[in-house]
Every structure is written in structure tokens, then in C-alpha cells.
Amino acid sequence: MNYYLQQTIQIRFIKIGGMTNSSVLQIGTCGQINSNSYLYNTGGFTEPAPEAKKNGGEGAPGGPTASPLVPLQTPRA
């Protein structure tokens, strides 16, 4: 059995607390949502990437006592 819906949706205000890479925001109905993932080598790289360095470890800019790259607010009591 097939259902055919026609909708009119008016949104006057929407507040979204957070979205991540795999989030889906759906307004209305949808029969099926297919996920897509594409991986392209646009830089033409032929070798694996170097190993990642641990945060604050050797080779990190400023060493282990460096201030954060993004200024953070102090926690409230």
C-alpha cells in the first residue's frame, strides 16, 4: 500500500542545540533516508599520513603547559 502525503509546514522559530557530522534534522515526513559517504583523494597523496602526536607531548607547540588554542571561560560555581 502506498501513501501519498502533501504537507505545508511553516516554521516561525527553530532553535537547534547542536548538530554533528552524522546528525539528521527532519521536518515533515520522509519515506526513506539514505546515508551517503564519499571519500576523495583531492590532494593526490600516495603515502600514509604520519602518526599523530599526543596532546601536550613532545613536538606539540608550546609544550605541555601551553594555553588552549581556543579561549575558554572559567567554570562557574
Image (spheres, rainbow, N blue to C red):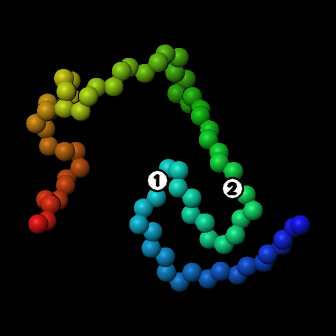
Q: Residue furthest right?
A: 1
x%, y% of residue 75? 15, 60
x%, y% of residue 59? 21, 24
- Please tell me in which quadrant of the rendered image residue 4 appears: bottom right
The secondary structure type at the circle numbered 1 is: loop
Write the residue at 19% across / 55% down: 72
**Residue in front for this viewpoint, 52 or 47:** 52
Mark seen at residue 33 = 2
Please name the amino acid that badge 2 sits on: Ile
Please name the amino acid that badge 1 sits on: Thr
Which residue position holds label 1?
Answer: 20
Q: Is residue 54 left or right of residue 49?
A: left
Neighbor class of circle 2 (other Cα within 10 Å; few <14, some 14-19, many 20+) is: few
x%, y% of residue 15? 44, 73
The secondary structure type at the circle numbered 2 is: loop
Write the residue at 24% across / 33% down: 55
Write the residue at 42% across / 61% down: 18
Q: Is residue 15 left or right of residue 31?
A: left
- Please tell me in which quadrant of the rendered image residue 10 appears: bottom right
Write the residue at 70% across / 81% down: 8
Mark 2 or mark 1, earlier in chain = 1
x%, y% of residue 33? 69, 55
Real-space Cα separation, disc 2 to disc 1, in angstroms: 17 Å
